[in-house]
Structure formats: C-alpha cells, structure tokens
Image (cartoon, rainbow, N blue to C red):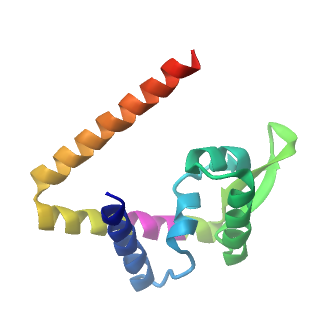
Amino acid sequence: MNEAVRIFENRIIENLKAKGHSELTAAHINLTRNLDEDGTRLTELARRASLTKQSMSELVDQVERTGLIEKRQDPDDGRAKLVCFTDSGFVWLEAFHQSLEVAESEMRDQLGPAMVDLMVEALGKYVECQINKEGDQAD
C-alpha cells in the first residue's frame, strides 16, 4: 500500500511540475494537505500529519521560504501563530487540486472506475473505524 501511495503522490508532483510548480516535495505536501484554507496552528498541523512539533516547524520554515505560506497572528489568541496560504499559495493549491484530479483520472483509466470507487469506499470505512476506535479509547 505504501508503494501505491508513493506512486500516486509522485504522479501529483509530476503534474505540478508540468504546470510550472516545482516548489515542493512529497514531504512538503504532507504539510499543505493538512493546512486549512483559513490557516491552522502549528501544533494542529503536526497532530494531523503525525509529526513532532519540531519536524512540522522545519517543514513550515522550508515551505515559507518558497512564498507559498506565511505565519500570521492568530486573531483568537495573540500568543499563537497561524500557518496560512499566501496568494501564491492559493494559486499553487489550485494547481495541486488539478494535479490530484489528473492522477485520480489516470488511476480510474488503469484500474476502472468501479475498482477505484470500491477502494475509496473501503478506505473511507477503514478511516471511520479507526476514528471511532480512537474515540472509544479516549472515553
């Protein structure tokens, strides 16, 4: 399964590069896929990506140097910072979504729509079961 994910993510990155967006690697995309459009705190990004705060901080600094994201004051907590997309970041995000659609379309062409729909449904159920299991453990 890891190999399939790696191949799929590489197709997205190749499509991004074809659109003139070579700023980020797969590791950086792990940050952007967890970043809300209205901004997300670093600690929440790290939690969502299953990374330490220090590792996520390094990724944020690297992506910030590309100009796609920036740190802003959190309006709800003056001590906290939000990681936010810049205007250039939103242009990149649109290209990312288009590249994701191309990669998924290629997968549907290769495996057939029914197979991809089944995989998406099965993986969705797996995620739901894991979330419910984590919720039960927290109680």
Looking at the image, residue 121 lies above or below residue 91: above
Q: How many marks?
A: 0
Q: Position of residue 107 (x, y in %)?
A: 21, 64
Q: Is residue 109 left or right of residue 41?
A: left
Quarter of the view holding residue 128: top left
The residue depicted at 36 percent of the width and 60 percent of the height is 2
Looking at the image, residue 36 lies above or below residue 109: above
Quarter of the view holding residue 19: bottom left
Residue 12 among those drawn in magenta: no
Viewer-proximal residue among 20 and 106: 106
Q: Position of residue 60 (x, y in %)?
A: 70, 63
Q: Which residues are magenta?
A: 92-98
Quarter of the view holding residue 130: top left
Q: Position of residue 64 (x, y in %)?
A: 71, 69
The residue depicted at 83 percent of the width and 45 percent of the height is 80
Secondary structure that dominates the magenta span = helix
Q: Is residue 75 left or right of residue 88?
A: right
Q: Is residue 98 left or right of residue 45?
A: left
Q: Quadrant of the C terminus?
A: top right
Viewer-proximal residue among 51 and 13: 51
Q: Quadrant of the N terminus?
A: bottom left
The residue depicted at 37 percent of the width and 29 percent of the height is 129
